[in-house]
Amino acid sequence: MAGGLEGRDVNTEKKVLGTNWNYVTDEFLFKFQTNVESAQGLMATKRNVPRVIASFYDTMSLISPIIVQMKILLQDICKADYHWDAELDSELKTR
């Protein structure tokens, strides 16, 4: 997977199953900037965590380890019995 997006040639990229693929270097490119920006504008609540998880599009399950970690976080939030609109504590926010 590509380390950074600077210096990349968009003429060598194609979309494959919704994921950018550089066919010259044979690398998949994941662009999380939109997901991160939309998540930063939300308050950290039980209601917004699934919204952020669902915003990732991964048809080939290449980033599933990251998504599983987010789902484990949601499971911990549910076990802690937070109300849907209550703000999470600082320990859960940093995870």
Image (tube, rainbow, N blue to C red):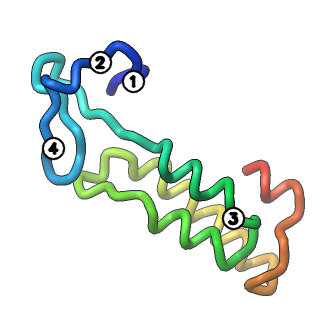
First along the sequence among labels 4 and 2? 2
Q: Which residue has dot 1 on it?
A: 5
As measured in the structure, the alpha-carbon distance from the residue carrying label 3 to the one carrying label 4 is 29 Å
Q: Residues within 10 Å of mark 3 (few under 14, many from 20)?
A: few
Considering depth in this image, is 70 or 29 the residue closer to the camera? 29
As measured in the structure, the alpha-carbon distance from the residue carrying label 2 to the one carrying label 1 is 6 Å
In the image, taking residue 53 as reference, residue 83 lies left or right, namely right
As measured in the structure, the alpha-carbon distance from the residue carrying label 3 to the one carrying label 2 is 31 Å
Q: Which residue has dot 2 on it?
A: 8
As measured in the structure, the alpha-carbon distance from the residue carrying label 4 to the one carrying label 2 is 15 Å
Q: Which mark is residue 15?
A: 4
Instruction: Say which residue appears at 16% left-offset and 30% top-offset.
Output: 13
Residue 43 x %, y %: 75, 66
Q: Which residue has dot 3 on it?
A: 42
The disc labelled 3 sits on which kind of residue?
Answer: Leu
Instruction: Say which residue appears at 50% left-offset and 57% top-offset.
Output: 68
